[in-house]
Amino acid sequence: MRSGSSDTFPRLVGDIGGTNARFALVTAPGGDLQGVRTLPCADFAGPAEAIGHYLAASGLPPPRCGGFGIANPVDGDVVHMTNRDWAFSIGALREALRLERLEVFNDFTALALALPVLRGPDLLQVGGGAPAAHRAVGLLGAGTGLGVSGLVPCGTDYVPLEGEGGHVTLAASDAKEAALIAWLAARHPHVSAERVLSGRGLAALYEAHAALRGEAAEPLAPEEISARALAGGSPPCAAALDSFCAFFGTVAADLALTLGARGGIYIGGGIVPRLGEFFVRSRFRARFEHKGRFGAYLAAIPTYVIRAPHAGLVGAARALERRLGGDGR
């Protein structure tokens, strides 16, 4: 971020997911994020309480404007979060925080705006070649839910996409996946991509694998499933994480084909970046390229895991910059 009127600073930026809310302040044009902090959403009744707690503890000057990415569609003044029991009015929140202006946007739409400034250690490339210049870029990430966005070229700039691609219908690529989806379909009215590519989705995959193996599933949290899979001590957990990565490849490839994302596919969220080398060695990339006549097309497209710790906040700052009249580049 490099421009903007000085009378809009300090700016409060946030990245609000279903599990955690992250906040920071930008105190001057071109300034770095200050006072970055992560708060568990479950500790607060709503965003006003979480932000109030953050501001009281930050020791930083009070903000004049704010911009938040939130894991939800944003259409009008009232927001009802999909994966968190928070509902609020944007106007009422602005008044409660005493902000001159408050902008709220989808979190992955904001994260997409951070992609052009990520460099070197911010990214881990998993397969593919070099990105094609000024072509569409895809973005998806699994956490509490499955976020999907991208960047589409527009003149010399990009336009970020706002959609709910995480709720597309999940497709099977082999008989084993068809059996998993059938097991899930008997218990849910719609088996979406998010149904398996999320924290709860990983738990659902573990339960499905255990059931299809004729075993009783333990009551395990998603992080426990990942830990056991990575340690190699639980076949159902390992099978669940393996299926998670393969399904991720399918959905990522579908996004790449839909957008013509020859500029690359980027992977954020809270789950995949923590898998490290397991994800690199997984079936993700092989499945990504497993598209018949378009295998060669996809083989050239690079896929990147986002490792920058606060990319969502960077994206929120850039999205706010655009809303306030700067270019946000």
Image (cartoon, rainbow, N blue to C red):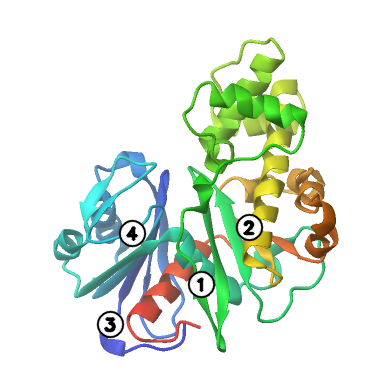
Task: Identify the secondary structure beneath mark 4.
Answer: loop
Labelled pair 3, 2 in contact (Cβ < 8 Å) = no
Q: Hey, what amino acid is under mark 1? A: Leu
Labelled pair 4, 1 in contact (Cβ < 8 Å) = no
Callout in the foreground (2, 1): 2
- How far separated are the C-alphas under marks 3 and 1? 20 Å
Query: 258 or 56: nearer the eye?
Result: 258
- How far separated are the C-alphas under marks 4 and 3? 23 Å
In the image, what residue occupies the spot 48% across and 27% down? 188
The image shows residue 280 at horizontal and vertical percentages of: 78, 50
Query: 50 or 181: nearer the eye?
Result: 181
Vertical order, 56 against 146 (above or below): below
Identify the residue at the far front of this view.
Answer: 293
> Which label is found at residue 74?
4
The image shows residue 195 at horizontal and vertical percentages of: 53, 36
- How far separated are the C-alphas under marks 2 and 1? 17 Å
- How far separated are the C-alphas under marks 4 and 1? 17 Å
Callout in the foreground (3, 1): 1
Callout in the foreground (4, 3): 4
Labelled pair 4, 2 in contact (Cβ < 8 Å) = no
Q: Hey, what amino acid is under mark 2? A: Leu
Q: Earlier in the sequence, mark 3 or mark 1?
A: 3
**Residue 82 vs residue 278: left or right?**
left
In the image, what residue occupies the spot 64% across and 48% down? 272
The residue beneath circle 1 is 113
> Which label is found at residue 8?
3
- How far separated are the C-alphas under marks 4 and 2? 22 Å
Kindly indicate the quadrant of the structure image that contains residue 227.
top right
The residue beneath circle 2 is 255
Dot 4: few (<14), some (14–19), or many (≥20) neighbours within 10 Å?
A: some
- How far separated are the C-alphas under marks 3 and 2? 37 Å
Dot 1: few (<14), some (14–19), or many (≥20) neighbours within 10 Å?
A: many
